[in-house]
Image (tube, helix red, strand yellow):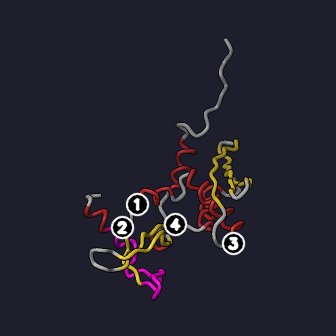
Amino acid sequence: MAENNTKTVGMGNDATEEILYKLATHFPTSQVSWRTQRVFQSFKDKKWYALALAYLSVRQVQDRLTEVMGHNWQCNHTVYGSKTVCSLGLKIDGEWIWRSDGAGDTNFEADKGALSDSLKRAGVAWGIGRYLYDLKNTYVPVVVTENGKFKEFLTDPWNIVRKNQSEFGV
């Protein structure tokens, strides 16, 4: 009977588990940025709020990859019409392992935005910043311009996150 020499990469290997743990380590809250998804005026209290979304910059993702992997990572971008897919490869146990995700063109610098967003999303596939997707909806009081456009948050969105967590016993 032939011996099976198939090597399972990423399963049960202590070094691999350590790499995945380091990639997924939370960033300090001061390094997480926030953007508004939508701004609205409450019917109840007539105050303005924004649905705030936490995000990391592409540089932070690249820095985390370099910090954990050294030069043992690479990415390839493939464009499909207005969509860009980033395949992010990590060299683990001498083998390249790939995970991919994509993004569409953005409203500002469309090509650059798609490249950055697809790399950030591929980074999430490796655990980088994935925890940010687990945050409950974060509605933050805001200041708006005369025409209802977002101007600034009235409080740090992390204050709302912490309040939500304590209310739900998290």
Q: Which circle's residue, 3 or 4, is located before the other in the chain? A: 4
Q: Which circle's residue, 1 or 3, is located before the other in the chain? A: 3
Question: Please, what secondary structure does the residue beneath circle 3 have?
Answer: loop
Q: CA distance from mark 2 to mark 4?
A: 14 Å
Label drawn at residue 135: 1
Please state the extent of the stretch shown in magenta in the rendering.
144-162
Q: Residue furthest bottom?
A: 146
- Circle 2/circle 4 CB separation < 8 Å: no
Placement of 92 over or under 29, stated as above or below = above
Placement of 27 over or under 143, stated as above or below = above
- From the image, state whether disc 2 or disc 3 is nearer to you: 3
- Circle 2/circle 1 CB separation < 8 Å: yes
Question: Please, what secondary structure does the residue beneath circle 1 have?
Answer: loop
Q: Quarter-wise, where is residue 108 in the image?
A: bottom right
Q: Which circle's residue, 2 or 1, is located before the other in the chain? A: 1
Q: CA distance from mark 2 to mark 3?
A: 31 Å
Question: Please, what secondary structure does the residue beneath circle 4 have?
Answer: strand
Category of crowding for the residue at label 3, using alpha-carbon neighbours closer than 10 angstroms: few (below 14), some (14–19), many (at least 20): few
Q: Which circle's residue, 2 or 4, is located before the other in the chain? A: 4
Amino acid type of the residue that numbered disc 1 sits on in the rendered structure: Leu
Q: CA distance from mark 2 to mark 1?
A: 7 Å
Q: CA distance from mark 1 to mark 3?
A: 28 Å
Category of crowding for the residue at label 4, using alpha-carbon neighbours closer than 10 angstroms: few (below 14), some (14–19), many (at least 20): some
Point 25% across, 58% down: residue = 169
Q: Quarter-wise, where is residue 164 in the image?
A: bottom left
Q: Which circle's residue, 2 or 3, is located before the other in the chain? A: 3
Q: Residue furthest top?
A: 1
In reply to whether residue 151 is colored magenta, the answer given is yes
For label 3, the residue is 109
For label 4, the residue is 55
Amino acid type of the residue that numbered disc 4 sits on in the rendered structure: Tyr
